Image (cartoon, rainbow, N blue to C red):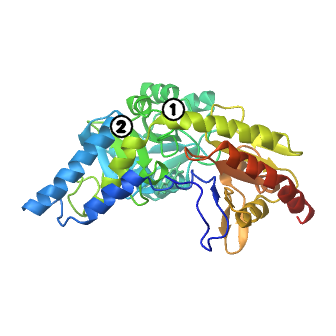
């Protein structure tokens, strides 16, 4: 696995600090995909080639299930984290309503757009969608949740780790509250996967979404774990694959890469990354006018969301890119104007403050030297960004 490579013009050695966006493809995942590419066969076909493809998919399902701490028949392969979130939220909501529960869905306001969009889509089906209260570090307010749960409903959706902040929720506690009140809990574990063990999350939740390209696998494949016994409603009505839960011919190549990545996704590798993130955070806080978002909450060890008062995050991202460093803002660029990150707005930041943020997300192949080089670059880059605001 590589983090630093030459840029496309072969001039500078790049530093990759954007692992929450996507991770470099692991060599073992690439090799497994190349082997799968050379096989013909649709897993639904009864002939030898088809059965070989089916064997590959089912072996991968067992590997993913073991990694999650679930059973193979609880794993539904999807086209990635987004589809797994949509299937989890919408599929659980429809199943809950079918089982006679009230059509209410609750989401944290800092969820990934995949979850927020899935919940909003349910409004057209008659569901009421409520946003939970979070504190200034992004933690779900337990008292607010308890009050809302008491009214009865279908699904609560909360991410185990936030994509912009790295902040973690106490999934076991939230799940216990939801279960006691008769709700199902969907957990987006896309940003927790590989960084912390998943079985405790799976043990607590009713559905859990993961994505291969955040753990060294390819983009375009992921999975939803659904607790056995829940009659998950398919979102797409056509086709029989994945036990009627996710139709469409399986992405055999992607699934092979996903399973290989799972074998490498040892959270111990991320324990070392936490030390680098701490080094980065200490260096950032030593710069004038820097605040770290989500610092008061437990976080996955790799993510540092820094706000540079008086500078535009976007200007810093561009300047760092030109200097050979890949980082990101949480802001979305739509038709030339940059919208502030909804996650940071939900923490209580103003729009201008939210535009000052930059997310650094590290991975196992980063080094202390890279951290120091980025810190050395940042001083003058931030000064310039402040002058030209
Ligand atoms: C928390 C979270 N959920 C869902 C997704 C979507 O995953 P995918 O890119 O595989 O669709 C992402 C991707 O950034 C994410 O960070």
Mark 2: give few (<14), some (14-19) or many (20+) Cα within 10 Å: many
- Dot 1 lies on which element? helix
Q: State the image quarter where residue 21 is shown.
A: bottom right
Q: What is the C-alpha distance between the residues marked 1 and 2?
A: 31 Å
Q: Residue furthest left?
A: 47
Q: Nearer the viewer, residue 100 or 347?
A: 347
Q: Is residue 228 visible?
A: yes
Q: Is mark 1 within 8 Å of ligand 1?
A: no
Answer with the quarter of the image where residue 205 lies.
top left
Q: Residues within 10 Å of mark 1 (few under 14, many from 20)?
A: many
| Residue located 36% across and 46% down the image | 224
SS state under label 2: helix
The residue indicated by pointer 1 is: 149
Q: Where does residue 288 sit, x and y in percent of width and height?
A: 89, 45
246 shown above or below 200 = below
Q: Is residue 150 visible?
A: no
Mark 2 within 8 Å of ligand 1, using the beta carbon: no
Image quadrant holding the C terminus, namely bottom right
Q: Give the x, y percent position of residue 72.
A: 25, 40
**Residue at image coords 50%, 33%:** 268
Q: Which mark is residue 307?
A: none
Left or right: residue 51 compared with residue 366: left
Q: How many marks?
A: 2
> Which of label 1 and label 2 is nearer to you?
2
Is residue 79 toward the left or the right of residue 164 in the image? left
Viewer-side residue, 131 vs 358: 358
Residue 239 screen position, x and y as percent: 22, 62
In the picture provided, is 242 more to the left or to the right than 91?
A: left
Q: Which residue is mark 2?
A: 67
Question: From this viewpoint, which residue is outermost toward the right?
Answer: 387
């Amino acid at each position: 696995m590589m983090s630093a490579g030459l840029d496309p013009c072969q001039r500078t050695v790049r530093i990759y600090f954007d692992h929450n966006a996507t991770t470099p493809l692991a060599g073992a995942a690439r090799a497994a995909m190349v082997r799968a590419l050379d096989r013909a066969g649709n897993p639904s076909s009864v002939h030898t080639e088809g059965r070989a493809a089916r064997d590959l998919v089912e072996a991968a399902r067992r590997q993913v299930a073991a990694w999650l701490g679930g059973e193979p028949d609880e794993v539904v392969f999807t086209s990635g984290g987004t589809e797994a979130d949509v299937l989890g939220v919408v599929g659980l909501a429809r199943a809950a309503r079918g089982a006679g529960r009230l059509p209410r869905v609750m989401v944290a306001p800092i969820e990934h757009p995949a979850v927020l969009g899935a919940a909003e889509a349910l409004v057209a089906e008659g569901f009421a969608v409520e946003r939970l209260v979070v504190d200034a570090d992004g933690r779900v307010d337990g008292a607010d949740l308890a009050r809302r749960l008491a009214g009865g409903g279908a699904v609560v959706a909360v991410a185990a780790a936030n994509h912009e902040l790295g902040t973690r929720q106490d999934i076991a506690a939230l799940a216990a509250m939801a279960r006691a009140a008769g709700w199902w809990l969907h957990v987006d574990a896309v940003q927790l996967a590989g960084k912390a063990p998943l079985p405790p999350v799976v043990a607590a939740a009713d559905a859990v979404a993961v994505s291969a390209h955040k753990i060294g696998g390819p983009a375009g494949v992921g999975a939803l774990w659904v607790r056995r016994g829940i009659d998950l409603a398919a979102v797409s009505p056509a086709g029989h694959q994945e036990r009627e839960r996710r139709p469409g011919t399986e992405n055999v190549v992607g699934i092979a890469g996903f399973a290989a990545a799972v074998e490498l996704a040892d959270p111990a590798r991320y324990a070392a990354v936490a030390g680098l993130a701490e080094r980065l955070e200490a260096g950032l806080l030593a710069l004038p006018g820097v605040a770290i978002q989500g610092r008061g909450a437990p976080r996955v060890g790799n993510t540092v969301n820094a706000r540079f008062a008086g500078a535009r995050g976007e200007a810093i991202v561009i300047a760092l890119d030109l200097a050979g460093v890949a980082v990101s803002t949480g802001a979305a660029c739509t038709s030339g104007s940059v919208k502030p990150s909804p996650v940071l707005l939900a923490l209580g930041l103003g729009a201008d403050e939210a535009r000052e943020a930059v997310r650094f997300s590290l991975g196992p192949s980063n080094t202390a030297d890279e951290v120091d080089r980025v810190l050395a670059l940042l001083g003058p880059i931030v000064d310039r960004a402040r002058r030209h605001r």
